[in-house]
Amino acid sequence: MRNGALLDVKDLRMYFPITRGIIVQRRVGEVKAVNGVSFQISKGETLGLVGESGCGKTTLGRAILQLYRPTSGQVFFEGQDLAHISGQQLRRTRRRIQMIFQDPYSSLNPRMTVGSIVGEPLDIHHIARGREKQRRVSELLQLVGLNPYYANRYPHEFSSGQRQRIGIARALAVDPSFVVCDEPVSALDVSIQAQVLNLLQELQERFGLTYLFIAHDLSVVRHISDRVAVMYLGKIVELANRVDLYRNAMHPYTRALLSAVPIPDPAVEGQRRRILLKGDPPSPANPPQACIFHTRCPIAIQVCRELEPPLDNKGASHWVACWRASESASLMPLMGEG
């Protein structure tokens, strides 16, 4: 593992079987939701993970936490390979890794009070009971900006933003060091999104948390992330420092995504070119050979259809999987005439 790396993911794959038959089922294929992903996250860092819906972002997050057991690959957390442990050993490790789910409505049990929801991890991991548990629950609710007297209320009595705060309090109950944030603001109003993002940043600074922040909104990712990984069809196609990626994106897919991000300045917006990709994303059950993006890429050449590009370091820890990375800016300008 790299010095300072809290999480080290190596060649992670998550395939789901495709079966046919009613009485006797037979395997006829597989959905390659995550297909050979490798990256590292340093302690205290936020890595943003972006891509279109269905590209495998959420599956990757759940495979890291072992909510889905990976088909193959390694997930080293604090030097321990999570993909090859189970039972009590995995349960003990899960105190250090938690998840904030996308939908604040479905992720909370409607039959449980807020106090029970936030306190449940304390019971499961034998952290606190009785008055100590009540004190800890009150402390967690205050930590996320909720009145501790709300502990006896049920989830339906709260707004979506408040429910997401409850989900954050639940994730923090066991003092984790790493949190997977699975699109935690996508279901919230824009006015509430900033409040939740600011809360996540404040908690990170206070407790030294490390985040994998999954989102499809590049403007949100730019606000909170230190580095950004761009995912397409189960693979990471670009990984770079936040500033470098937004100023000098090298992969054609990343440049297409950036061209769709609204810019509030009308003068700048008027100069920008919108990059429209042809067709729909291919099925992860039958991904293209060689470069997975070549079927939609406007600058693809013959080598893109014959050989798979490796994820190479193009300098300053800017990793790109594209045969034409050095030419993409001039061939796909975002502003003016390039």
Image (spheres, helix red, strand yellow):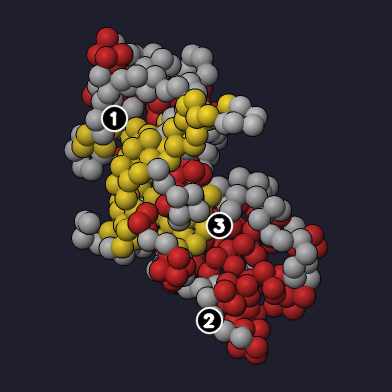
Tell me whether circle 3 and circle 2 mark residues in contact (CB < 8 Å). no
Residue 182 against residue 234 in the figure, above or below = below
Q: How far separated are the C-alphas under marks 3 and 2?
A: 20 Å
Q: Quadrant of residue 195?
A: bottom right
Residue at x 31%, y 20% (from the top left corner): 290
| Image coordinates for residue 4, horizontal then vertical, percent | 25, 62
Q: Helix, strand or loop at disc 2? A: loop
Q: Regarding mark 1 in the picture, which secondary structure is present there?
A: loop
Q: Which residue in the structure is indicated by mark 1?
A: 321
Q: Position of residue 222 (x, y in %)?
A: 44, 45
Q: Which amino acid type corresponds to the residue marked 2 in the rendered image? A: Ile
The amino acid beneath tag 3 is Ile
Residue placed under numbered mark 3 in the picture: 100
Tell me the quadrant of the picture where the C terminus can be found. top left
Vertically, is 126 above or below 30? below
Which mark is nearer the camera, 2 or 1?
2
Q: Which residue is mark 2?
A: 127
Q: CA distance from mark 2 to mark 1?
A: 45 Å
Which residue is rendered at x = 61% and y = 45% of the image? Answer: 186
Mark 3 vs mark 1, CA separation in Å: 30 Å
Q: Residue furthest front?
A: 24
